[in-house]
Image (tube, rainbow, N blue to C red):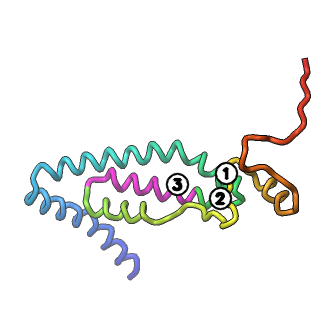
Amino acid sequence: MRFLFLLLILLAFPIAEIWVLIELAARYGWLVLAYLVLVGVLGWRLIQDEKLLMLGRMAQTIQAGGTPIKALFGSAKNLIAGILLILPGVISDAIAVILLLIPAGPKVPADAANEPDFVSRETRQQDAGGGTSNHGGDVIEGEYRREE
């Protein structure tokens, strides 16, 4: 019974997409075609940008102490939204917008919100342990030795 219901939904979706496109084309004419082309280009751009940002996002999540699965799901969500934007149809575009509005980014701890991006977890742990650090200036503490 469940399988039949899912099959009915899968068959009804393209029919509903075509029906909505025909109704909108009858009402707005060539603007629907311009909309479909514009949204298709935006979907393609989203996929291209997500391919470039996926590894960086995963590395940033790992560095922040999170699991890469969360970043992977966020990237997969954006890739699926891009594919839905490329597909011609208003219903699939609405689903893509809903997917894009769902937040998937890592939550930043309250104590790390005011620190610069270049501060590592080890530095924060040293600061919590009583060590001193200069986060406000351009001074990097350490030893220097020149070898020629």
Q: Which residue is mark 2?
A: 114
Under mark 1, the amino acid is: Pro
Residue located 31% across and 63% down the image? 94
Residue 141 location (% of width, % of height): 84, 42
Q: Is residue 129 left or right of residue 81?
A: right
**Element type where label 2 sits in the image:** loop
Vertical side of 30 occupied by 104: above or below: below
Q: Residue furthest bottom?
A: 1
Q: 39 or 5, which is in the foreground?
A: 39
Label 3 packing within 10 angstroms: few (<14), some (14-19), many (20+): many
**Element type where label 1 sits in the image:** loop
The residues colored magenta run 72-88
Q: CA distance from mark 1 to mark 2?
A: 7 Å
Q: CA distance from mark 1 to mark 3?
A: 25 Å
If you read the primary sequence from the N terminus, does the residue marked by circle 2 or circle 3 appear first?
3
Q: Are marks 1 and 2 in contact (CB under 8 Å)?
A: no
Q: Residue furthest front?
A: 137
Residue located 37% across and 60% down the image? 96
Q: 132 or 96, which is in the foreground?
A: 132
Q: Is residue 86 magenta?
A: yes
Q: Which residue is mark 3?
A: 75
Under mark 2, the amino acid is: Asn
Residue located 50% across and 64% down the image? 103
Q: Which residue is mark 1?
A: 116
Residue located 30% across and 47% down the image? 40
Residue 67: quarter of image: bottom right
Q: CA distance from mark 2 to mark 3?
A: 26 Å
Residue 121 location (% of width, % of height): 77, 56
Residue 41 location (% of width, % of height): 32, 44
